[in-house]
Image: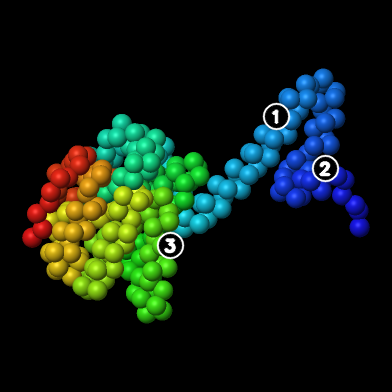
Amino acid sequence: MELLSPIEQLCEELKLPVVAQEYNNLSIIASQENWKYSQFLEELLRQEYNEKMSRSKNILTKMAGFPAIKTIEQFDYSFTIGVNRKQIEELASLAFVKRYENIIFLGQPGVGKTHLAIALAYKAVLHRYKVRFTTITELIADANKAKRDKKYDSFLKIIVSPSILIIDEIGYFNMSKEDANHFFQIISARYEKGSTILTSNLVFSQWAQIFGGDKVVTTAILDRVLHHSHVINIQGDSYRLKEKRESNINSDIYKFGAKSSTKIVEKVQVV
């Protein structure tokens, strides 16, 4: 077994694998090119840093659980109504994460809600924020399981921990009152502690039908979700039906009827 040099031993203790691997080769280059010692040290540490950042981003991306990687650059602004490029670019600065603000994307299926939600969250991952993606179905199933297993408090701590939590597909199934209470507990636990990005195919006045018809719980949920929030209401045809539209097949039934708005909603009447 080859003995480690003192430098390699120290690097192993300090968890600096790149320094251990590259210092010898880099020292030869530094000698040949007459680098100052500070220049050699800076380059050596830079390589270690870059490798650590790359590993960190890969781990955070895997932990996020994105169904696919989407970027803001890939989004087609010309295909939809209600998406303000400047607003998306401002959100991409990630100031909303530091302010614990929420984002709600509304619109019919296929207009790009999930794309934008993932794109903003992926941008956060690249800046080393912890992110989690889940659908409303998966989230409620996890909550019910935690309740049965008597691990509900631990479940809520896990839900609060990401800087950004994406909850996708709100409105695709109607919850029981118990499910609605789980959702309220999740939103309440994250309130002013982290940013939550929601996507829904229903306007807010229809949300009571999602949450077991409970207007009180629905109002409490909306009160917390909409405080410190950005609401982006997307109109247009489904991306997935774009080819059909171009083939002159009428897809008007897929258009989202609500008015486009990027303003913060102060109050919503639940009917």
Q: Secondary structure at mark 2?
A: helix
Q: Is 259 left or right of 228, judged from the image as shown? A: left
Is residue 237 in sight in this rendering? no
Residue drawn at x 43%, y 56% is: 161
Q: Which residue is mark 1?
A: 42
Q: Which residue is mark 2?
A: 7
Q: Secondary structure at mark 3?
A: helix
Could you give the CA–CA distance between mark 1 and mark 2, rounded to whole angstroms? 17 Å
Within 10 Å of the Cα at label 1, are there few (<14), some (14-19), or many (20+) other Cα atoms?
few
Quarter the C terminus occupies:
bottom left
- In the rendered image, residue 144, in percent from the top left (x then y), is placed at 34, 74
Q: What count of labels does the image hold? A: 3
Which mark identifies residue 158? 3
Q: Is 26 left or right of 175, judged from the image as shown? A: right
- Tell me which corner region of the image, top left, top right, bottom left or bottom right, holds residue 260: top left
Q: Secondary structure at mark 1?
A: helix
The three-letter code of the residue at mark 3 reads Ile
Could you give the CA–CA distance between mark 3 and mark 1, rounded to whole angstroms? 38 Å
Could you give the CA–CA distance between mark 2 and mark 3, rounded to whole angstroms? 40 Å
The front one of 130 and 237 is 130
The front one of 127 and 137 is 127
Which mark identifies residue 224? none
The three-letter code of the residue at mark 2 reads Ile
- In the rendered image, residue 190, in percent from the top left (x then y), is placed at 33, 56
Q: Are marks 3 and 1 in contact (CB under 8 Å)?
A: no
- In the rendered image, residue 97, in percent from the top left (x then y), is placed at 37, 43
